Amino acid sequence: MRVTNQMMYADVLANLQAHGKKLARLQVEAGDGKKLHMPSDNFVAMGDALTLRGAIQSNQTYLNNISTAREFLSASATAMDGLSTIIQSGLAIAVRAASDTFGPTERDTYAKQVDNLIAEAVNVLNATHREQYVFGGFKTSTAAFTAVEVQKSITAAKYNGDSGLRKIEIEPGQTLTMNVLLNQEVPELKIAPARMLSTLVNLREALRKGLAPDVGFQIGELQGDLDAMIRLTGEAGGRLMRLTATQDRLEKVQIGLSNTLQTAEDRPMAQAVLALKEEETVYQAALATAGALNRNTLFDYLR
Amino acid sequence: MANLIFGGIQTALTALRAQQQAQLVSDHNVANANTPGYTRQEAVLGTRSPLGAVAFNRASGGAIQMGQGAQVELTRRMAYDFYDDRLRTEVSVEKQWLERADVLRHVEAMLPEKDGSGIAERLSEFWSSWQQLSTDSADPAVRRSVRDAGVRLSQSINERADGLVNFQRYQDARLGRLVEEVNQAAARLAKLNERIVVAFKADNQPNDLLDERDRLRSQLSELTGSTSYIQNDGSAVVSIGRHVLVARQNAQLLRAVNPAATAAPAPPVNPANPAAGGAAPVPAPTGTVSGHLRQLQWEDGQAAEVKMGTIGGLLIGRDKEVAARISALERLSNTLRSEVNAVHKTGFGLPPANATGQDFFVGNGAAQLAINPLLEANVGGVAAASVSASPGDGSVALKISQLESRLLMDAEGTRVPAGTEAVGATRSMLESWADAVAALGADAVRAQRELDSHSAIVEQLTTQRDSVTGVSLDEEAARVMRSQRAYQAAARVLTNFDQMAEEVVMRLGMVGR
């Protein structure tokens, strides 16, 4: 086969271009540690990477939702603990006042104590978390309960909220209610925990009137209110435990997804640098070959 | 005797001339060693017709043949038509793939998805913002984040759609320039044909014209994938498909015409573009030709079909590769707009306005997708609640966020008709977009592999052709040396005959002076 000058230069040029292309590619990979830059770098991995990033983002959103729900439910549970304490205080007063040994003065003192408990209960029923009323259902921007006063004495609390259950998604297709409704009956007891306010009002009135049997009756009612509040608090605690378990699982899934994504799109640095060095050597050899082409031709020997 | 001496001088002279001509051919070869398309030439030496000289001392009494020296019989053009024809065919295929690979590389650069900088990331952020709103629907900051995520998503879709449509326009303008190049080459070839025919009729060997003819054949083939053959008179006939482009001195020209300028009003940039807010299924016109783009026509009005070469690749790139990506963006934006709007309309904004029945997205097609200006101005109108005056209700926001995982598209990325999702839908919007990006990558890889494969064949054929037609400087140097030595020898012979003539003219007949 005849070898012409154009053939030799074309070969050298083709080699230089091929190695230069590889070198440029490896430089980019070593520069940012990524092997996926364009879909054509690895279209299967690119498709996977996009859906994986979407899954990681969704997972993170679920983790954020869980965190929001935990905060909201914790605020609700703290408020319900406060209400339970108020009921227990009312119960203690009722038990003491039910005894006939106390006179009207003492009972009046107890009535005033209960009055304070009622005022405190109204405050707690209007508990907020991040400027949202926690017990108002969907009506989070207006006070959940408004005290009805007669002669500067609270006689009832009007519910301003609705029966809205604030559901949030904690994993695909799984929702969880993050609020608690105090004015709805606990199914097993047929008692709405918010009834505790009217029970306390009744207790206060019985104490003011000095009717020991009525005071005794309110003990049973308060006991029922306490049971309802504790059951609801326990149910909220159960939801908090479910949130914690889901959070733990999603965090593990998140680590797994991140690792898979890294495998799909990251280039180990040591590997990238080594490959770059190898290609540099080959490129230098191709350059040396190109240099050798400038050798003398037969024309140099013509006289 | 004198005749023989002067005959010898004449013979030596023919040798000098022949060797000079051979040197000139080598000189021409060396001068064109790097000229693209140049076919090396070779001086073919031959003997001149001998003279019959009377030989009285021959027993037969007949004439003897006296050689009359050397001459260059022809300058042979070392062409190898078989390689040339194969090379032209392969180059036209290579150019088509080169153009397609270039187009796909541009499109890849226009749809960046690296490190979460793409539409997929914006889409995930968008769904995430709705999730957040579902948990904290009254918070103005969260509402603003939903609006901002919507703006970022729609802008990223707009930018990409604009980029692709502008790229189509650039390709359209380039088509015009390439057609002009084809027409100029065809016109030049037609003129050249005429000169070659005349040269052959005059029994000339127009080697350089033949090189130029073959260069133009190659150029036309690279541009259009045209085929050609040589007639007995030396002229080239070039055809694209079944239509003749050049025959003898006639060239039929191509035109890139805009059908919209002469026909019905132009359809939109991409047909996959139903009205805003509609829940109608989105058609998937993959590979369709946008109506505003120019089409190829012959001078006589017939449609020209150019499938190979740079123009063939450009047309496939413009009308299939780019159009398919515009379609994918259109399908995504239309599905996004109609699905989000359908749920958003059922919800309520914050009190006191409690806005309802509003679209979240507005605008036709991917290039115009935008957030409803009313919501952009007042985030309180973003409908998160299913009941009026319920700031804590995020159930509509939750429904919108759940669109993220809802299977709405089929495997081809088309929105299945509403109500048949359970049967035909297999992909969510994000998965469908990821499929489109992966398909783009697969097409780019295929184009690059085809290009590499055809480039390797072209390289090999070029090497084979060059091994026959290319100039080797060493070889030419050897020829020059050979001619030089022959020239020197002929000069010596001439000198010798000159001395003999001197003997005859100057020394004979001295007796009696």
Image (spheres, rainbow, N blue to C red):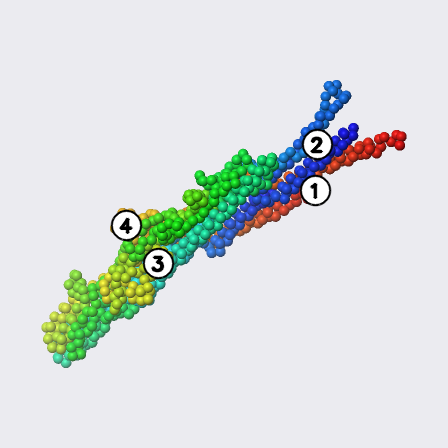
Q: Amino acid at mark 3?
A: Leu
Q: Residue at x 40, y 56 (%)?
A: B162
Q: Circle 2 — which element?
A: loop
Q: Circle 1 — which element?
A: loop
Residue at mark 4: B417
Give how far apart the Cα atoms at labels 4 and 2 are: 91 Å
Sequence-wise first label, 4 or 2: 2
In the picture, measured across the screen, residue B380 lies left or right of residue A31, that is left
Q: Amino acid at mark 1?
A: Leu
Please provide percent x and percent y for residue B324. Answer: 38, 49
Give how far apart the Cα atoms at labels 3 and 1 are: 75 Å
Give how far apart the Cα atoms at labels 2 and 1 are: 27 Å
Instruction: Tell me the quarter of the picture where residue A253 sits.
Output: bottom left
Mark 4 — on which chain does it sit? Answer: B
Please provide percent x and percent y for residue B27. Answer: 65, 42
Residue at mark 1: A302
Residue at mark 3: B369
Q: Amino acid at mark 4?
A: Pro
Q: Nearer the viewer, mark 2 or mark 3?
A: 2
Q: Which class describes the residues within 10 Å of circle 1: few (<14), some (14-19), or many (20+)?
A: few
Instruction: Tell me the quarter of the picture where residue B465 sits.
Output: top right
